[in-house]
Structure formats: structure tokens, C-alpha cells
Image (spheres, rainbow, N blue to C red):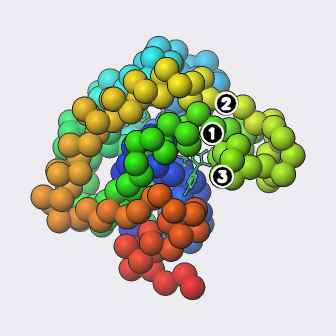
Amino acid sequence: MKIVLLGPPGAGKGTQADVLVKKLFVPHISTGDMFRAAISSGTPLGVEAKGYMDKGQLVPDEVTVGIIADRIAQPDCREGFLLDGFPRTLAQAEALDKLLAGLGGLDAVINISVPLDKLIVRLTGRRMCRDCGNIYHLLYNAPEKEDVCDSCGGQLYQRADDCEETVKNRLDVYEKQTAPLIEYYTRQGVLKTINGDQQINAVLAELGDALGQHWG
Ligand code: ADP
Ligand code: AMP
């Protein structure tokens, strides 16, 4: 299955993707995670991406499409993949269509919808594990021990771009550059919108229904 999780920053794409890929047996491809890994390793890609990410802007399309083209050409993507945070512009969506021409195109684009005011609370309260990337929230998905990852014991941190100022920029960027993809994929007949403003497990159940899966 070739799936895209669409939705504003904070909608719960990463949270749902982590669970979904274990059920669907496809790789989780998050451009945000790829850029953060490049920043940690200090590669030229990381240095370039950081300048944009710190301001809440998008990394240029040529760069982002390039890393996705390389990633989905890997053998583990032959049976499909789950894209999280890509595409984010019309140019990226068109580039993805070209990359998938001859491969049957996308099977589903799931738009996770959450009201704007809730997104700000979700993003500013998000904490991530430095070691395994697990996602937490101080109120909605709190770790058992403050600042410690439940699954690997790693240290939790707040992403630099989750401060309130940058969050507002990111939500503006979403409205201007990414929201138009809802219409783009509606026209292609592959878009399904689900309600992301409910408990994490309820969102997962709705996602399963949208993908025609029965997880019980
Ligand atoms: P995205 O990948 O779309 O930016 P995340 O999955 O990182 O979003 O989720 C953003 C924040 O919201 C995280 O702190 C996460 O724990 C929290 N979160 C995710 N899904 C829900 C939900 N259904 N209800 C409440 N909080 C949620
Ligand atoms: P995310 O982890 O999805 O919230 O992404 C974090 C940041 O990485 C974004 O604010 C952008 O700066 C950058 N980024 C991630 N995915 C993309 C993309 N598809 N296009 C451009 N920039 C991206």
C-alpha cells in the first residue's frame, strides 16, 4: 500500500504512523525525521535544512523531492510505504505523481483534521525521545517518568520548532502551501478525511476504517 498521511503540524501524523506501519508492514517515511537525522549527523543536508526548519519554513522542493526519490527507490519500499509530512506543496505532490507513474499511483491519502486552537496546544506540549524518536505530550500522552522515554529510557526533549512563535509560522505555512493539497487529492479521488480531534486510539480506529482494515 502506498499511503500519504496529510494534515497540519500537530494533527497526529507521526503518532498514528508509528502504530500503522507495524500493522501494515510498510516503512514509515517522515521527511521531518529524515531532516532531523541529517541535522544530528551534521551532514550538508542537515545544515541546509536546519536554516529553514528553525524559522518554521519549508525546505526547498528540489531538496525534499530528491531525498524522497532516493528513499522510495530503496528495496524495502517495493511493497509500499507510509509517507508522513510529504508532500507539503503542490510541486511536491506533482513530483510524487511522476515518481509513482507506472507503479499504480497512491492507494490512499488520509487527511487528519484537527481545529487550529488544539494544534497549538498539541505542538507546544509535544516532547520527543532523543534516542528512539517516540512522541509524547505533556498532557495527552505523558511519559510515566518526567523527561524519560517509556520505551527506551532515552531523554525527552522539546523540538526547537515547537516554541509558540515558530508554531504559528508553521501553521501559516500549512494554510498557504499544504492545505491546497486537500483539493488536489480530492480531485484525484484518493482523499479521505478523518477526525483527528479524538483520543489517539479512536483516531487509529477511524484510520483503519478509512484504509479498509479491520483491526478489532
Ligand atoms: P504531527 O506528526 O502531525 O506533527 P504528532 O503525531 O507529533 O503530530 O502529534 C503532535 C502532538 O500531539 C504530540 O505531542 C502527540 O503526543 C499529541 N497527539 C497526537 N495525537 C493526539 C490525539 N489524538 N489527541 C491528543 N494529543 C495527540
Ligand atoms: P515535521 O517533522 O513533519 O513537523 O517537519 C519539521 C520541519 O521539517 C518542517 O517545518 C519543514 O521545515 C521540514 N519539512 C518536513 N517535511 C517537509 C516537506 N515535505 N517539505 C519541506 N519541508 C519539510
Residue contact between numbered discs 2 and 1, judged by CB atoms under 8 Å: yes
| Foreground tag (3 vs 2) | 3
Give the CA distance from mark 3 to mark 2.
15 Å
On the image, numbered disc 1 is attached to which residue? 126
> In the displayed structure, would residue 168 be above or below residue 143?
above
* Horizontal arrangement in the rendering, residue 174 relative to residue 55 (left or right): left
SS type, badge 2: loop
The CB of the residue at mark 1 lies under 8 Å from ligand 1: yes
Residue type indicated by callout 3: Tyr
Front residue (pair 163, 110): 163
Residue type indicated by callout 2: Gln
> In the displayed structure, would residue 183 be above or below residue 22?
above
The residue sitting at 81% across, 37% down in the picture is: 147
Residue type indicated by callout 1: Arg
Between discs 3 and 1, the one toward the N terminus:
1
Give the CA distance from mark 2 to mark 1.
7 Å
In the image, which disc is placed on residue 158? 2
